[in-house]
Image (tube, helix red, strand yellow):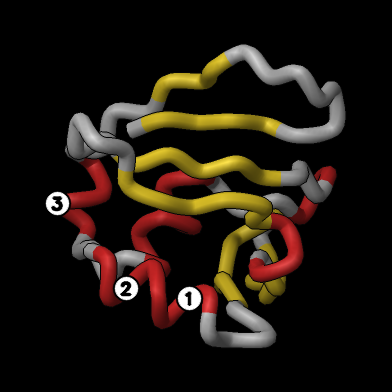
Amino acid sequence: MNCAIAAFYSQQEFFIKTLKKQQWVQVDVRPLVHHLGLKPDGSLEIAIQPAGEKMPRLTDILGDILNLGDKQRKLLRIVKLSSSHSQSSDTEL
């Protein structure tokens, strides 16, 4: 998992293909992800800046970053944490 996170951070752009209003669109999520890392308890934490209507689902973002298959994506447990910044969203897996 650390390798996938490091690979994500090493890229200037990271496009996610998502279906919105019955059309496929590509969204660069690299500037939207403010923090992504493993916590000492083994959970994964991500802080993102929402991108409005074109925002891919969080499971799609994490699934693509971590190279997860469909079955693994369905097993993700996502919990939204309170944030001190009203503009960002902190999520823990």
Q: Position of residue 93 (x, y in %)?
A: 33, 33
* Label 3 crowd (10 A; few <14 / some 14-19 / many >=20): few
Toward the left, the furthest residue is 71
Please tell me which of labels 3 and 1 falls first in the chain: 1
Which residue lies under the disc numbered 1? 8
Name the kind of residue labelled 1 in the image. Answer: Phe
Q: Quadrant of the N terminus?
A: bottom left
Residue at image position (70%, 51%) is 55
Judge whether 42 appears above or below 57 on screen. Answer: above
Q: Secondary structure at mark 3?
A: helix
Depth check, mark 3 against mark 1: the one in front is: 1
Q: Position of residue 75 (x, y in %)?
A: 18, 38
User: In the image, 11: left or right of 73?
Assistant: right
In whole angstroms, how far apart are the C-alphas of marks 3 and 2? 18 Å
- Which image quadrant for residue 5? bottom left
Foreground: 44 or 75? 44
Please tell me which of labels 3 and 2 falls first in the chain: 2
Name the kind of residue labelled 2 in the image. Answer: Ala
Name the kind of residue labelled 3 in the image. Answer: Lys
Q: Secondary structure at mark 1?
A: helix
Q: Secondary structure at mark 2?
A: helix
Please report contact status of discs 1 and 2: CB closer than 8 Å, yes or no: yes
Judge whether 44 appears above or below 69 on screen. Answer: above
Q: Position of residue 73 (x, y in %)?
A: 26, 49
User: In the image, 57: left or right of 93?
Assistant: right
Which residue lies under the disc numbered 3? 71
Foreground: 3 or 73? 3
Please report contact status of discs 3 and 1: CB closer than 8 Å, yes or no: no
**Label of residue 4 in the image:** 2
* Label 1 crowd (10 A; few <14 / some 14-19 / many >=20): some
Q: Can the viewer see residue 91 in this picture?
A: yes
